[in-house]
Image (cartoon, helix red, strand yellow):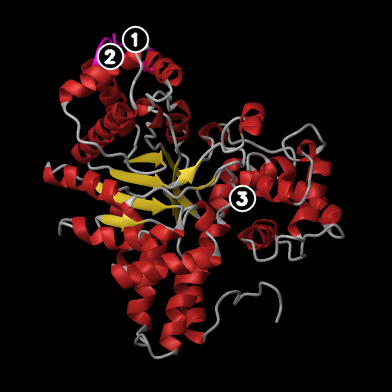
Amino acid sequence: MQFMNDDFLLLSKPARRLYHEHAAQMPIFDFHCHLNPKDVADDKRYRSITELWLGGDHYKWRAMRSNGVPEKFITGDASDWEKFERWADTIQHAMRNPLYHWTHLELKRIFGINDVLSPVTAKKIYDACNTAISGKDFSARSLMIKCNVKAVCTTDDPIDTLEHHRKAAADKFSVKVLPTFRPDKAMAVENPQLFNEWTDKLAAVTNTNIHDYQTFIDAIKKRHTYFHECGCRVSDHGIERVPFLPVNDDEMISIFAKARTGVHITHDEIEKFKTGMMRAFGHMNHDLGWVMQLHMGAMRNNNTMMFKQLGPDTGFDSIGDAAVAQPLSRFLDSLASAHTLPKTILYNLNSKDNKVLGSMLGNFQDGTVPGKIQFGAAWWFLDTKKGMEEQIDVLSELGLLSRFVGMLTDSRSFLSYPRHEYFRRILCNVVGTEVENGELPDDMEFLGRMIENISFNNAKEYFGIAL
């Protein structure tokens, strides 16, 4: 069988029908990514496939390091061709890693290249990609249009100006580029220097004299409102686990004062402050009708030497194994009990927590919104073929697959949109195979509509964004 032909991953006739007649035609709503909004505002053009493909992509960097590639050819000062050449050598060793499929889907869909990337084909592919990139259809905006993207939600600090989002909107760019409120630094009292530097910047951007906890919260609410005015409808929180220790207002006031004055803060006080802040964010999101995304399970910056050399998000994070069930339940319950639980998407990074999250959903659905509490798409180290299949299976077994809001890229690259195709093919194969086996009815009208909804319509409805 030909490598990655038109029926790639589609192992039954019903799967092929569901994909080709339904999933393939759907546009993309990429509601969680790490694109640089400045690149969209400036409609950035790229000097080479290396800058566009390898720049900032720590998935590829990890693979190259595993292949014995020196850092000079990854994040160092080697030439674009030298870096690409090392990537071409690495990818031939990455079979069964999702990078192998993603790489070749991107070459096929975006560049029209069907050759397998290897040291033998590297120069030919490098030259062909660079020739394409030099044309008019390979700027940042053009790539989004080329991939049928309707909207993206970037990941933004509350103190960001959002000037680039506003420019894209003012230009009437056909793709909506919306911010996401990511306030992790607002509760980082375990790092007093970082917390205080961030709080000082918050004071400056809001023109607020932050002298106590209440003025701190008031300033954050100002930014929350400003983000809303700029089209934001979602917050995102990157946490190893959801914090939860009961805390009252007086304790929050005291802990904030300690953090600002350099007084030692205990482990329990850190946990309490994070709990109070997460609850505050939940209340804010509920009041404005936002979605709250909880990304749980990453153990970050494991390699101290490389963190000092390169900083965060450079490929030295891994899966954590913290206990998530009890604190997550208590956190969601605290919001539900106060009638302020927003629509919430739960993402886990450790597959041991799949059924924990899959079963947790049903505790807090309240009949107001279909799938109000979501089990998010397989994320980061789990967005493999098997990881996606497992997430689909758990959601199907413990919840309602048909209400799923679907896939996202979680990427910094404008070439990553074929990941949506990869997910859709896997989804169609799971459903189609069960039709073939007689486990699901051969109702292509209903199933086709379900596939279309998971691919795009459910997310559009859930986030309440006109597209």
Assign the N terminus to one quadrant of the image. Answer: bottom right
Whether residue 308 is situated above or below residue 149 in the rendered picture: above
Mark 3: amino acid: Leu
- In the image, 42: left or right of 160? right
Which comes before the other along the chain, label 3 or label 2? 2
Q: Amino acid at mark 2?
A: Ala
Element carrying mark 1: helix
Which span is picked out in magenta?
A: 202-213
Closer to the camera in the image, 306 or 97: 306
Residue toward you, 111 or 411: 411
Whichever of labels 1 and 3 marks the residue nearer the N terminus, that label is: 1
Q: Would you name the residue on which mark 1 appears?
A: 261
Q: Residue at x 20, y 35 (%)?
A: 246
Q: Position of residue 222 (x, y in %)?
A: 27, 23
Please name the residue shown 43% across and 28% down the image: 162
Amino acid type shown at disc 1: Thr
Q: Is residue 131 visible?
A: no
Mark 3 and mark 2: Cα distance apart in space: 46 Å
Q: Is residue 159 visible?
A: yes
Residue marked by disc 3: 415
Q: Horizontal and vertical percent for residue 391?
A: 42, 64
Q: Position of residue 449 (x, y in %)?
A: 35, 72
Residue receiving disc 2: 257
Q: Position of residue 202 (x, y in %)?
A: 37, 18
Left or right: residue 128 versus residue 185 is: right
Picture quadrant where residue 140 is located: top right
Q: Is residue 50 magenta?
A: no
Disc 2 and disc 1 in contact, CB within 8 angstroms? yes
SS assignment at label 2? helix
Residue 244 or residue 79, whichever sits in front:
244
The number of discs equals 3
